[in-house]
Image: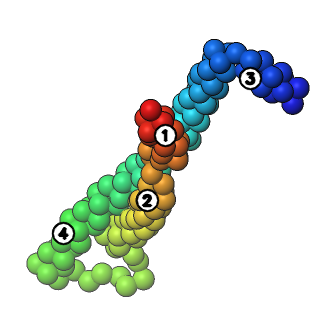
């Protein structure tokens, strides 16, 4: 590798066209590497975005299920309240009413959904899906090339 650089330098010192050609080739290599880095960074960001989106979607889904169960609980609770008030039916305190069962299931789904929604939002907030580092390096090189003229 070192002899190749020395050979290029020795040959370039004699011929300015060879020197300019070497600079152009190095510039092309640099741009190719930066574009490859940008692509890899975008792929990693896409993977993180899809993971965060799936967590968020699962959390939203569980929250919707919780809302459905809580709605059913409210309906059964109202039914039980009006049935008790109108018929004066005594409820056995040792048995759990149907609305209590719906409420417990709804609360469990709601807590799990809330945790997953919170985790999904935190994942989205933890990164920027745009390739910041690679784009900044590429912009810096382009500015450097423009200012060289």
Residue 128: percent from left, percent from top? 45, 51
- Report crowding for label 3: few under 14, some 14 to 19, many 20 or more residues within 10 A (C-alpha): few
- Report crowding for label 4: few under 14, some 14 to 19, many 20 or more residues within 10 A (C-alpha): few
Give the label on residue 134, or none: none
- Do labels 4 and 2 touch, CB within 8 Å? no
Give the label on residue 144, or none: 1
Q: Nearer the viewer, mark 1 or mark 4?
A: 1
- Report crowding for label 2: few under 14, some 14 to 19, many 20 or more residues within 10 A (C-alpha): few
Give the label on residue 13, or none: 3
Judging depth in this view, the residue of 108 and 127 nearest the camera is 127
Relative to 22, 90 lies left or right: left
Give the label on residue 79, or none: 4
Relative to 134, 56 lies left or right: left
Relative to 25, 59 lies left or right: left
Quadrant in which the N terminus appears = top right
Whole-number angstrom distance, CA of label 4 to CA of label 2: 44 Å
Residue 10: percent from left, percent from top? 80, 22
Residue 98 in sight here: no
Whole-number angstrom distance, CA of label 3 to CA of label 4: 95 Å
Whole-number angstrom distance, CA of label 1 to CA of label 3: 24 Å
Q: Nearer the viewer, mark 2 or mark 3?
A: 3
Nearer the N terminus, badge 2 or badge 3?
3
Judging depth in this view, the residue of 75 and 57 nearest the camera is 57
Give the label on residue 125, or none: 2
Residue 143: percent from left, percent from top? 44, 40
């Amino acid at each position: 590798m070192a002899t190749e650089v020395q050979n290029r330098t020795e040959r370039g010192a004699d011929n300015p066209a060879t020197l300019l050609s070497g600079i152009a080739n190095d510039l092309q290599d640099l741009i190719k590497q930066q574009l490859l880095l940008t692509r890899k960074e975008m792929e990693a960001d896409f993977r993180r975005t899809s993971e965060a989106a799936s967590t968020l979607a699962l959390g939203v889904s569980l929250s919707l299920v919780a809302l459905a169960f809580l709605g059913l609980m409210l309906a059964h609770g109202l039914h039980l309240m009006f049935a008790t008030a109108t018929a004066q039916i005594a409820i056995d305190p040792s048995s759990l009413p149907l609305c209590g069962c719906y409420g417990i299931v709804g609360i469990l789904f709601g807590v799990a959904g809330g945790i997953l929604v919170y985790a999904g939002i935190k994942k989205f907030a933890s990164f920027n899906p745009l390739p910041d580092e690679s784009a900044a390096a590429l912009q810096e090189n382009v500015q450097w090339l423009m200012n060289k003229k």
